[in-house]
Image (cartoon, rainbow, N blue to C red):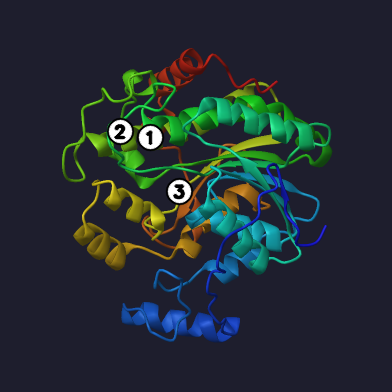
Amino acid sequence: VGSKAKSALDRPGLSKPIRRHPRLPSDSRAAETATADRMGCCCSSVEKSMDGKPIKWYDATVSSLPDLKGKVIAITGTTTGTGNIAARVCGQKGATVLLLNRTSERSESSLKALQEAAPNATYVQIPCDLQDLSSVRLAAAEIKRLHGETGIDVLSCNAGIMAMPDEATKDGFDTQMQTNHLSHWLLASELFPVLAVGGARTGDARLVFHSSGVRNMIKKLDPKNLGKNGGNLGGNGTGMTGPRWARYNQTKLANIVCTYALADRVDAANVTAVKILCAEPGLATTNLQKTTHAQGGMGKGTIGCLFSMMGQSAEDGALPLLSAMTATDAKNGDFYLPKGGSSGPPVKIKKREKHCDDATNKKILVEKSIESLGVDIVVA
């Protein structure tokens, strides 16, 4: 269809293009990265992301991913960060990419930058505010209208917010839990039949969730975090061990518990054409930390020290997500994460972590999500 994007609102973009960095030949870039690794530093000659972090594993991993011509891939949260990079790569590889974002100048600016990076791709704007359940339902209805008969191939539940104040959405839920889990549960409930149509066509449709290393900061889901208790969940506190971080940790444990609960359902129903997968980006340097800092959830020192010492580029951080969405060796229930924990090339976790696969956590997650939203995710 060319580089023209179809928009559900047909609104013009208002942005400046994102500055792009020159690329080195792959063999030279790999050699310089290896030298940097041996020295324990980041050499200035290694290609760098917009955030200044060296890009180490992106090219090799992206080149290993399959051609995506004919695929329809829906991604939440594509204006910046891992979702934006996933949208760019999928478009460059030939997919039609549905961009599910809140309508804003930033989403229009991001669209223009994606079109410039992938001029032959088809991007479709789908207005979707995850902090408004009625908006989520409208987004699902629009995707059904566009692709209900032919199906979609991937629904990537990528969007998330981190360590936000103790506030309620208009629907009454904690802003973090609704954005990171509940709205994605609703979206998946509405669109699983559309994924099933895509799976019947190709044999390989995917529902992908996005967790985080902080899933290991807690062992149990708290049912009250999944209910209409927004603004009443401990306040804000200070530091990275306060209540705002505890609420964030709950959402990221919910993401992987949800993955395993649904993957088990798919297996039990003998559904082979739709896979349920999860990813985590490690310590990827994105706008997520800047937004958290602006809302009082993280100090500049934390961002500067933790992410400069241990973090990786947004490009490398997007690789587990891209692998879960498109890698040819993916299996139902797979969980992709960086090899080194905070950074590294994407690998599959070898064994489910006990608390993430805990029967009580799964029961809480499923029952409270259904109770709060009034919908289940029916896989068969």
Q: Nearer the viewer, mark 2 or mark 3?
A: 2
Residue identified by numbered label 1: 176
Q: Quadrant of residue 9?
A: top right
Q: Secondary structure at mark 3?
A: loop
| Residue 15 or residue 337, whichever sits in front | 15
Find the distance from the CA under tag 3 to the CA under tag 1: 17 Å
Compare marks 2 and 3 and give the one earlier in the sequence.
2
Q: Residue at x 83, y 38 (%)?
A: 201
**Residue 280: mark:** 3
| Residue 263 appears in the picture as rendered | no
- Residue 67, position as x, y percentages in the image: 75, 59
Residue identified by numbered label 2: 247
Q: Nearer the viewer, mark 1 or mark 2?
A: 1
Amino acid at circle 1: Gln
Q: Secondary structure at mark 2?
A: helix
| Residue 360 or residue 325, whichever sits in front | 325
- Residue 261, position as x, y percentages in the image: 52, 26
Asked whether disc 2 touches disc 3, contact meaning CB atoms under 8 Å apart, the reply is: no
| Residue 192 or residue 264, whichever sits in front | 192
- Residue 321, position as x, y percentages in the image: 54, 51
